[in-house]
Amino acid sequence: MEKKEKYNQFESERQAKENLRKYPNESERSLIEKTDGNFNKKFSDNSHNNHNYQEDSLDRIQTDLQGIRTVPVSGALRNRKEKSRWGNGNRRAAKKQISGFSKFLIIYCSAALVLISVFLIVFRQYIAAYENTRDEHIIKNRLSEITASEIDDMTAAFPLCKYENSELIADRLNSAVKSGTFSCLKASADDNGVVRTYSVFSDGIRLAEVTVENIGEKASFGFEKSEITSISLGSTNSVGSGDSGSSGDFGGRKNVRLIFPKKSEVWINGFRADGERFLSEIVYPLASIYEKNSSELPNMSVCEVSGFVIEPFVEASLDGTALKAVRKTSEDFDEYIFDFPDSETYSMIITAPEEASVCVGGIELTERELKESGIPYDSYVDNAFNRAAGELPTNHRYRIEGLLTIPECSVLLDGDIIPCSESNILSGEIYYTYSRSAEQLFHAEIHVPDGTAVFVNGIELGTELLKSSDYIYDEISDFSDLVETPLTEQLYVVDGLYKRPVVEIKRDDGRTEVLNETDKGVYKIENMPDDTLKDLNSAVVEDFITKYVEYTAAGYTDAGSKSKFGAMLDCVMEKTQAYEILYSTRNSFVQNLPCDILSLDINTYDYRKWGDNCFSCTADFTAELRNFSYKTDQITGWKLYFTEKNDKWYLVKLNFE
């Protein structure tokens, strides 16, 4: 029995290894492992009945497998072998395809590289041939090789000025071609383009004029070969290429005028300009617009030098500081104006209220000079009305640079001059601060009828700001002594405002109304018209106007008796403004010749009551007159004021609109 158990154990291990080799799939292997368990069990139970247990076990394995699975193991093995066979075939086919494509790709890339290499070689040769035949390349090569002896040949008949020599000119030309600013501009060409002339520049300076001509030969790739036939330095100084000589025309030399501060040192082409002709001094020509009219501008020295082949390099310094030059070109001179160094100039910084107009040297400053906004005041009047305005007052700051003098500065606000409250000079910077005085702040003078509620910036005014509760209206203040119980109003005054206030009133019916500024800082409610006064007083007004027209129409016929003039004056109270005006102008409005009154149209309106015995109205009239011709006498917007005395109405004041 012990031997059989060892054998069974050995057989189970062998069978498990065989299943692992044949069935790598986990599901199939688990199925076989289950049948192995049944095989071992049945083999153990029947071993004593059958000595040929191996054959019996194999038969029982097949019987048990048929009971456990519906698919035979042999079928599963056959399917796996078929799949494996087809899979191996596909992999072999894929290997064959990849190998063929790789060979093709290698051949294709190799051919492309060869073609690209050939193209690049040809293209490089093409570019080289093009560059070598290009006019600018030819000019560069020629000027880079020009020598001082060639310059001597060109200028032999016309000696150079003492600030210019052949070595310097040759070096200028040799180095110019290496400059990044070197350029050739085509100046002219013949009809066929065979002969071409170029102006040569470097650093903005015209160095020469070069003529290039085709020689009738072809270079690589069919490009035309060309050569330089002449070179003209500066203007008309010519030298040929090869055997041709200079043109002999040397009349195009340059003249230079130098303007520089006194005591400056000046160099021309590296030579110090000593002993030259210095002209009379001129006023500093680079002054800013803010100091053009200043009498304090300095005078400048002037030096002129003539006969340069090529425009020279000029330099100047003052007390060891290099000066910057401004170049101006004219028909006669190339002018260089050397400015003063920054250490000799001023900057002006102005701080002023944002609402103010700032002028420097008579020029009003704009956003161009404005450098900073919204700068708070150093101090301000802190009251409820300014706080209620929403924003605290701010300043603008302006800056002007490069001033040689200190021009006059003025600051205006609403026509008033704002004084300078602080000034200081620090390291060439001039600081000005302009601040409004207490008298220059905004104020509100508010006229309203008695009992009217007044608001400034939303704050109701109290009695502490009430200046007068019986203020007589301005319209009748000059004759209020003639008025019984004159109409009065309340007067409020609010001072110390940085901005124009918002003034509102509240009517008896609760309506809120915004008052507009009628004069500088004045807000008022006009005395309201009363239409009932027209029915009561229109006859008085029409009577005065009728007598006025009769007097003016009478002309010289009324000069002796003055009956019509006297009748008109009977409607006017003596020693009043109306009486003085009408009497002093008695001959100014009359007709030259007497006229007949054909018609008189009178319209009166806008009646207002100013007291128990005073009213005003506005009148328009048109009088059609005739003497030897037809005439029209017309007045519109005539403001008339009347008062009653001893039961009679008199005119006391009149205004012509």
Image (cartoon, rainbow, N blue to C red):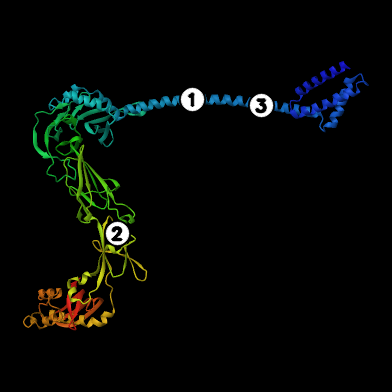
Whether pointer 2 and pointer 1 mark residues with C-beta atoms closer than 8 Å, the reply is no
Identify the residue shown where x is 84% and y is 17%.
6
For residue 34, which quarter of the picture?
Answer: top right
Front position in the image: 140 or 65: 65
Question: Would residue 249 be seen by someone viewing this image from the given angle?
Answer: no
Element under disc 3: helix
How many angstroms separate mark 3 from mark 1 (CA)? 31 Å
How many angstroms separate mark 2 from mark 1 (CA)? 85 Å
Identify the residue shown where x is 64% and y is 25%.
95
Q: Report which residue position mark 3 lands on.
A: 93
Which residue is outermost to the top? Answer: 3
Q: Is residue 392 above or below residue 50?
A: below
N-terminal of the pair, mark 3 or mark 2, is 3
Inspect the image, locate mark 3, and give the three-letter code of the amino acid beneath it. Ala
Q: Is residue 118 above or below residue 465?
A: above
Identify the residue shown where x is 20% and y is 44%.
423
Q: Residues within 10 Å of mark 3 (few under 14, many from 20)?
A: few
For residue 498, which quarter of the picture?
Answer: bottom left
Q: Report which residue position mark 1 lands on.
A: 113
Inspect the image, locate mark 1, and give the three-letter code of the amino acid beneath it. Leu
* Residue 63, image x, y percentages: 87, 28
